[in-house]
């Protein structure tokens, strides 16, 4: 090989090394984090996929993987055990597991109320809680809105035993409602209403919050050890998530498309996802992401009185923090 060829080969090798060295920090800069949803991917969780699709999590140094669940219990257990970095669950679910010493804490609020309601068909003739007397009501055995039905009925001066309850698994709940097996069912305003209307079934919701049964809705949770050892990770994740939600509220179609592309089969109906996200936006508080002492105190009280959790923590700092919210 000539000296010129040797020099060229050396230059090329040097350039290759420089490229490798330049790329190496970037390759190692991304921190792998995971998010466990409390259910399947839906319109109201589409902003997480939007943030991934936009590259916002990666810009913050996070390589986010989203995992679906079939219930809040699974989601919080996965976070508490360290199998997921973050989770999204309603505040009552978080309070229940924290009362059992689960090492998690809420670090941001996505919905100031949980949207619990009694769902009925628009043409059912059930126009008020009084009309539920003598009717059939369906829910799963572990459903929080189902377990709180008695409190809702009492708040409306309706005897709880005047409503006939039917318990069934989730896979048969929708079919039972559509088929007329029961007249009303436990639901979330931002989930079931768009879901049924996408099937051409007009429904209405009678909301628990309207009679004072107001609890915080979706929150972001993480482990206490993550807060202690990786505070910057928590801060970046919360900031990007809030950014993604605020953008999605203004661009719901774009968010729905991201969920369709990156989420599971449950997010394939973009029209339904847009409807869910639009209804979820109505529950977002201002300033977005903040958890107040008053809202948490109300949530804790209602969990203690209605969800069989007598030992709810009295120290609110054990339950949530606002320290990771953007300034």
Image (cartoon, rainbow, N blue to C red):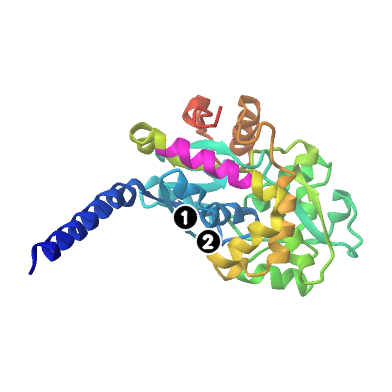
Spatial separation of the CA atoms under disc 1 and disc 2 = 7 Å
Q: Position of residue 66 (x, y in %)?
A: 48, 57
Q: Is residue 191 visible?
A: no
Residue highlighted by disc 2:
70
What is the number of the mark on residue 273?
A: none
Q: Which residue is nearer to you in this view: 60 or 12?
A: 12
Mark 2 element type: loop
**Where the N terminus falls, by quadrant?**
bottom left
- Residue at 53% across, 48% down: 88
Residue highlighted by disc 1:
74
Neighbours of disc 2 within 10 Å: few (<14), some (14-19), many (20+): few
Q: Where on the picture, by quarter, is residue 230?
A: top left
Instruction: Locate residue 282 relative to residue 294 in the image: left or right.
Output: right
Q: Where on the picture, by quarter, is residue 266?
A: bottom right
In the rendered view, would you say 102 is above or below 143? Answer: above
Instruction: Locate residue 233 relative to residue 150 in the image: left or right.
Output: left
Mark 1 element type: helix
Q: Position of residue 265 (x, y in %)?
A: 58, 71
Instruction: Locate residue 189 relative to residue 40 in the image: left or right.
Output: right
Q: Is disc 1 in contact with disc 2, using a CB cutoff of under 8 Å?
A: yes
Neighbours of disc 1 within 10 Å: few (<14), some (14-19), many (20+): some
- Residue at 64% across, 38% down: 216
Q: Where on the picture, by quarter, is residue 193?
A: bottom right
- Residue at 13% across, 62% down: 4
Q: Position of residue 307 (x, y in %)?
A: 59, 43
Q: Is residue 55 visible?
A: yes
The residue stretch that appears in magenta: 233-245
- Residue at 57% across, 61% down: 41
């Amino acid at each position: 090989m000539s000296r010129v060829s040797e020099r060229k080969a050396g230059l090329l090798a040097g350039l290759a090394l420089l490229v490798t060295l330049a790329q190496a920090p970037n390759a190692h800069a991304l921190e792998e984090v995971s998010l466990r949803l409390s259910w399947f991917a839906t319109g109201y969780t589409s902003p997480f996929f939007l943030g991934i699709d936009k590259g916002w999590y990666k810009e913050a140094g996070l390589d986010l993987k989203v995992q679906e669940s079939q219930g809040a219990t699974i989601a919080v257990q996965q976070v508490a055990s360290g199998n997921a970095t973050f989770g999204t669950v309603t505040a009552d679910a978080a309070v229940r597991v924290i009362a059992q010493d689960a090492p998690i804490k809420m670090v941001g609020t996505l919905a100031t109320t949980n949207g619990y309601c009694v769902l009925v068909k628009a043409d059912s003739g059930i126009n008020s809680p009084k009309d539920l007397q003598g009717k059939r009501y369906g829910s799963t055995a572990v459903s929080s809105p189902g377990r709180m039905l008695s409190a809702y009925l009492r708040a409306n001066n309706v005897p709880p035993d005047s409503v006939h309850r039917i318990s069934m698994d989730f896979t048969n709940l929708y079919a039972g409602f559509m088929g007329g097996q029961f007249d009303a069912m436990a639901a979330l305003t931002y989930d079931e209403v768009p879901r049924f209307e996408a099937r051409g079934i007009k429904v209405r919701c009678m909301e628990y919050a309207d009679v004072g049964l107001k609890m915080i809705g979706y929150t972001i949770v993480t482990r206490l050890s993550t807060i202690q050892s990786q505070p910057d990770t928590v801060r970046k994740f919360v900031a990007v998530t809030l950014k993604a939600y605020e953008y999605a509220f203004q661009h719901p179609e774009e968010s729905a498309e991201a969920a369709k592309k990156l989420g599971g089969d449950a997010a394939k109906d973009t029209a339904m996802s847009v409807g869910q996200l639009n209804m979820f936006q109505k529950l977002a508080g201002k300033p977005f992401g903040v958890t107040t002492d008053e809202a948490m105190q109300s949530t804790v009280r209602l969990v203690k009185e209605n969800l069989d959790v007598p030992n709810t923590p009295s120290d609110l700092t054990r339950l949530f923090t606002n320290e990771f919210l953007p300034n």
